Image (cartoon, grey):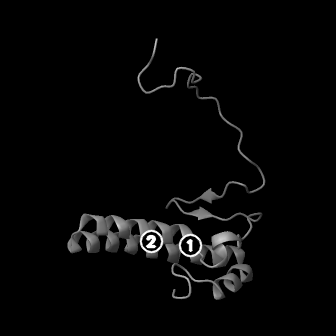
Amino acid sequence: MRTRGLHPKAPPADSTPRPRPRGGAVPSIDGAGYARPGPTDLLVTAGPYRVLRHPSYSGALLAILGLGLAFGNLASLLLLFGSVLVGVLHRIRVEEQVLSSALGENYTGYADHTSRLLPGVW
């Protein structure tokens, strides 16, 4: 017997609690949905973080820009990209305040020599 949407070999769903990693491996989330770094969290400065502080936001904005261009309508492009950009800029501001207060000089020193979204620009 097959149930729609479920893999036939999937284990039955249950409510058994799962163990969580210890030692700050899971950052806490405040009421607004922002992650709060714990005392054992490390500042990542390798890979794309060598150049940008928020490479995932840069990628998302690039994808949104491409989607807006695919619509072929300037109003759609401006509305779509503009609304996402406003949200991302707010999120960056909040995250950088949290990181700088939690990680101190490590983060501010890192922020001094990396760009936020566009390498070498901002």
Kind of residue at disc 2: Val
The residue that appears at 58% across and 26% down in the rendered structure is: 14
In the rendered view, does 27 fall on the left or right side of 120? right
Q: Which residue is drawn at 71% across and 63% down?
A: 38
Type of the residue with mark 1: His
Using a 10 Å C-alpha cutoff, classify the residue at mark 2 as few (fewer than 14 neighbours), some (14 to 19) or many (20 or more).
Answer: some
Of residues 114 and 96, the one nearer the viewer is 114
Residue count near mark 1 (Cα–Cα under 10 Å), binned few <14, some 14–19, many ≥20: some
Callout 1 touching callout 2 (CB < 8 Å): yes
Query: Left of 30 or right of it: where is 47?
Result: right
Please name the residue that numbered disc 2 is placed on: 88
Q: In which quarter of the image is residue 10?
A: top right
Which of the numbered marks, if any, corresponds to residue 13?
A: none
Disc 1/disc 2 C-alpha distance (Å): 10 Å
Report helix, strand or loop for mark 2: helix
Q: Position of residue 92 (x, y in %)?
A: 51, 74
Residue at the (49%, 68%) spot, across then down: 59
| SS for dot 1 | loop
